[in-house]
Amino acid sequence: MHNCPLDEFNNQAESCKHVHGEYSRISTITMMQPFCMTLLCMVSLWCVVQAIKIQTYNVGFISFIDNYEERKENAIRALRSGDYDVMCLQEMWYGDDIDRLKKKLGKSITVYTPPLYQERMFGGFLKAPPCHNAPITAACIALKCADLANNYAALANCTVECGLMSESQGCITCLSVSSWTPLRCFNYWKGESINIPGVVLLSKRKVTSVKTVFFEPNVKQLSRRAYIEAEIEDVGTVFCSHSTSNANTEYYEPQLRHLYSSLAEQNLADSRKLIEAALQADKPVIMGDLNTGPEIPANNITNEFEDSYNEFLSQGFQSPYVTMVGKCTFCRKNPLVEDWEYDEVLDHVLVRNHTVLGAKRIYDQNIPGKDFPMSDHYGVEVEVGN
């Protein structure tokens, strides 16, 4: 909140009184009175307007992105000291990582995740790893399918043949984000839980209500997506999401092939569901790695699932980051990005009925002393006035 310059205002007000009392017969008072009233209004507004910083960041807490452990520790430190009011995180799947984040952030920051999947054993007395009940399936996938990880369509067919879709969603997600190598999914020492959609919401402001909504309810998926919807004081209704990505040229979700023929279609469906929910709110904010973005020729930005981005615009949402900054958030020159030829803006804070004060790219510098940043994505901040 901006500091209110009361002393300066009082001095100016006294001057106005003096002019009005001592020289009321002088014709120039007709000029001073509007000035005094304007000054009063301007200072009053300055005192009550609050700048609210809304951020999104795909942290990439996943082992197939290099330097996972080191990046994680630096990212959690940055989140602890970060200057934000609301933060949407993506790709934070492992329960141990969430526990560490909560411990480091303390009680001053609300940390909300979707309900975590926790497997148990011995009648529920002890925590078990996510794939506790799937050793045969996991072994089959490790032996037959792991080498297909770069071709999700072929991988999906292989995992289905191994019986993956009969296992729990927690196990499916764990194997998927662990690059189909099952070691962490069978770690009995940790027995950790799984955040199935990988999204986490942080807030330094009061959260009055919050819930998780899955895009495809009750359908097991290799990459199951959802959004967090929360009412946050002085901000409005926020939707924290990680939408369907362009991970393969062929469509690969085994149990959604009757609905979608491409990942672009599924991303567009995700976007429309976000829009439908957000339009029920007076001051909505949709944020996250939405895996959609426009072409920006001036900055050599390539479009990604642009029909989805245009759908947001057609419903009255704006991306201040795109219009005010327009730099890539998923960049080919990022040392952690491999086998990618384009610069894209995939990460957004989309607003409707908000007064935009500014926008910038965040977390785009290398970790001190290292030649890589904290993630393969850069973050986005949009500042609004309440």
Image (cartoon, rainbow, N blue to C red):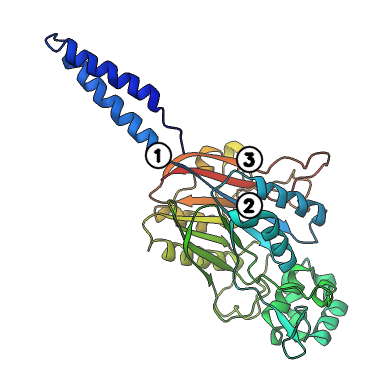
On screen, residue 308 versus residue 24, left or right, reads right
Give the x, y percent position of residue 242: 60, 62
Residue 236 in view in this figure: yes
Give the x, y percent position of residue 186: 82, 77
Instruction: Residue at the far left: name it.
Output: 25
Residue topped by disc 3: 300
On screen, residue 226 versus residue 147, left or right, reads left
Can you tell which of label 3 and label 1 is closer to the viewer?
1
On screen, residue 270 versus residue 343, left or right, reads left
Sequence-first disc among 2 and 1: 1
Q: Is residue 50 above or below residue 42?
A: below
Can you tell which of label 2 and label 1 is closer to the viewer?
1
On screen, residue 216 versus residue 282, left or right, reads right
Sequence-first disc among 2 and 3: 2
Q: Residues within 10 Å of mark 2 (few under 14, many from 20)?
A: many
Residue drawn at (78%, 76%) of the image = 191
**Amino acid type, callout 2:** Tyr
Q: Residues within 10 Å of mark 3 (few under 14, many from 20)?
A: some
- Where the C terminus falls, by quadrant? top left
Give the x, y percent position of residue 10: 33, 23
Give the x, y percent position of residue 351: 45, 50
Residue drawn at (68%, 50%) of the image = 377
Residue topped by disc 2: 57
Residue topped by disc 1: 49
Nearest to the observer: residue 386 or residue 343: 386
Q: Is residue 376 above or below residue 23?
A: below
**Amino acid type, callout 1:** Val
